[in-house]
Image (spheres, rainbow, N blue to C red):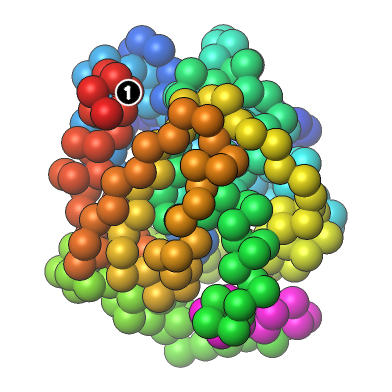
Amino acid sequence: MQHESITTNGIKLHYVTEGEGSLIIFLHGFPEFWYSWRKQIPAFSTDHKVVAPDLRGYNDSDKPGNQSAYVMAELVQDVKGLIEGLGYDRCILVGHDWGGAIAWNFAYSYPQMLEKLIILNLPHPARFGQGLLTPQQLLKSSYIFFFQLPVLPELLLQANHYAAIETAFKGMAVDKSAITQSDIDAYKAAAAKPGALTAMLNYYRNILSQGMVSQDWSVLEVPTLMIWGEEDTALGKELSYGTEKYVRNFRIRYISQCSHWVQQEQPDLVNQYIREFIEGRI
């Protein structure tokens, strides 16, 4: 794996890359960084140019200070600039968690730049908005409302040597052995970089004002695969139901006994499903 950086949309993004060929981009979620795709990068570098960036605000990418720098429109432009800066006009886009939210929005903004879209454990924005109207999902998403507070979430996340980050992974994972202590230490180190925690939380602090849950969503024409770990305690499985209403060419694969951290907990199955979808076998 090679570590590179690129200037896009006025900021510098750090990314890891391996392989040559058509472009496949992997977008991570919270509280991760490129490292969450460590089991996917070598698997797809055999016949693709794989690029896994640190999203803006994370790890070794730039961390603008203003909260407004983390609105969805900026995050989408980061991806557009990344694709173009790498010398491509199209890619396969894979996103998990917040990376999935960005990928959905990118697909609606620039469908012509996507060959295929692959989403892991993040519902279609319309379904997420509908889910927030239910008591069960409101309870699961209560941390989002806590993250709206100033300062206090940062203090909680960094308390006791970033113990909350370890709890997020170990507490949610079904197979605890899939995420090792060295993996958790890597996530803690990334979150501890100056400015990172506030930047990561600013994604959430814009969530209610950036159109993720309130706009009209037309039918998406980009071929789309959703992979869903069924034991996700943050996002209920029912949020995946009805996605076909919003995506014309839609496939879904559920993975039982697997948490929100699906590509880390069940990398072989995730890689298999992605490969089958890319090759048109599902």
Answer few, some or many: residues within 10 Å of disc 1's Cα (few below 14, many 20 plus, some between 14 and 19). some
Question: Is residue 183 visible to the viewer in this orientation of the structure?
Answer: no
Residue for badge 1 = 278
- Tag 1 secondary structure: helix
Q: Position of residue 143 (x, y in %)?
A: 59, 80
Magenta stretch: includes residue 150: yes
Q: Is residue 71 left or right of residue 4?
A: right
Above or below, comparing residue 185 to residue 91 in the picture: below
- Which of these two is toward me, 220 or 159? 220
Q: Residue at x 54, y 36 (%)?
A: 247
Q: Quadrant for residue 105, please give it.
A: top right
Q: Position of residue 238 (x, y in %)?
A: 45, 65
Magenta stretch: includes residue 275: no
Q: Which residues are magenta?
A: 139-151
- Which of these two is toward me, 54 or 91? 91
Q: Quadrant for residue 45, please give it.
A: top left
Above or below, comparing residue 177 to residue 21 in the picture: below
Q: Position of residue 17 (x, y in %)?
A: 39, 28
Q: Residue at x 46, y 89 (%)?
A: 160
- Which of these two is toward me, 206 or 166? 206
Q: Quadrant of the N terminus?
A: top left
